[in-house]
Amino acid sequence: IAWKPSGDYTDIVYETAEGIAKITINRPEVHNAFRPQTLFELQHAFNVARDDSEVGVVILTGAGERAFCSGGDQKIRGDDGYLGDDAVARQGIGRLNVLDLQVQIRRLPKPVVAMVAGYAIGGGHVLHVCCDLTIAADNARFGQTGPKVGSFDGGYGAWLLAETVGLKKAREIWYLCRQYDAQEALAMGLVNTVVPLAELEAETVAWAREMLEKSPLALRMIKGAINAVSDGAAGMQQFAGDATMLYYMSEEAQEGRDAFKEKRRPDFGRFPRRP
Ligand code: 2NE
């Protein structure tokens, strides 16, 4: 697949090909740990992918074979969050902007696939949990470290993980901070499949291509439906927005718009009162 890079980023790489956007966290020297700048760039790239009507599937991955993402960069962790090099950070004020990215992945109305080689650890583990699907290389290792390094993610990192692997296993993952290999992850339903490292991208692209053959609106609605349960009112708000979008696409809704513009009474009588 011939990836075409675009965008002006320092911490990530954004590429597209054949209706797929590939977003790569590019800080291999720290196992792709994220800093505030990384997350601003990821948010920007996910917005670009969302807005691009040619893109039907987004892949999130990490540079190199050793790590998908090792979570927040502990070397720039301040006393209240992660410090960038912007004006806010110069006042000593930290950020936890990975939480905004998690929400964005959930809200993105296209499937997001985590392509994991090596470590998916800490906040990096939560990112793959937030993705719709995870394709793991056989060298992948999964786990949370928060209680070891003085952190935790009580949001998606807790309840979405529990929804994925069950409550007992989620507690084990958090309370013991062990690492799990790819086969263990597969057995607990944490990933969709495990492939040899050399085949990771080809397999992920094959899954993406299979999804691209499907109805984009159906995928959008089923993603929203599955997320609505655990996202509560915010999930329903998105699902309701999609219902409005579908209604706008109907002649019935367009009659209301046209009648307003033509300064006449709308004629809704020709539309059935459906059972
Ligand atoms: C991932 C793991 C287990 C890998 O171990 P190993 O031995 O294979 O590699 P090593 O030597 O630890 O790491 C290679 C280089 O990457 C850096 C290391 O410091 C090392 O660089 P040097 O010190 O040799 O220069 N590196 C790795 N992870 C880093 C990180 N997260 N921040 C900064 N530098 C990192 C092992 O590296 C490990 O345990 N990493 C830390 C994982 C971790 O605890 N992450 C943070 C969890 S908290 C979080 O992400 C979070 C949250 O809970 C809530 C909100 C927001 C964020």
Image: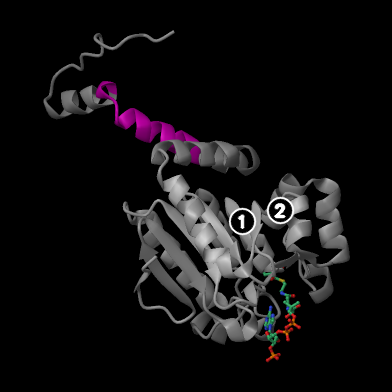
Q: Magenta stretch: give its range.
A: 238-252
- Seen from the viewer's position, the closer of residues 193 and 48 is 193
- Calculate the distance from the C-alpha at mark 1 to the C-alpha at mark 2: 8 Å
Identify the image quadrant of residue 183.
bottom right
Disc sitting over residue 181 in the figure: none
Q: Secondary structure at mark 1?
A: strand
- Seen from the viewer's position, the closer of residues 89 and 195 is 195
In the rendered structure, which amino acid carries the disc numbered 1? Thr
Q: Residue 142: give x, y in percent of width and height.
A: 73, 65
Question: Do the CB atoms of the residues marked 1 and 2 lie less than 8 Å apart?
Answer: yes
Residue, x 49% and y 83% (percent of image)?
Answer: 87
Q: Which residue is mark 1?
A: 134
* Mark earlier in primary sequence (1, 2): 1
From the viewer's perspective, is residue 159 above or below residue 81?
above
Q: Secondary structure at mark 2?
A: loop
Label 2 CB less than 8 angstroms from ligand 1: no
- Please indicate whether residue 47 sits to the left or right of residue 80 in the image: left
Q: Residues within 10 Å of mark 2 (few under 14, many from 20)?
A: many
Residue 126 appears in the picture as rendered = yes
Residue, x 55% and y 36% (percent of image)?
Answer: 225
Q: Residue 85: give x, y in percent of width and height.
A: 52, 86
Disc sitting over residue 190 in the figure: 2
In the rendered structure, which amino acid carries the disc numbered 2? Leu
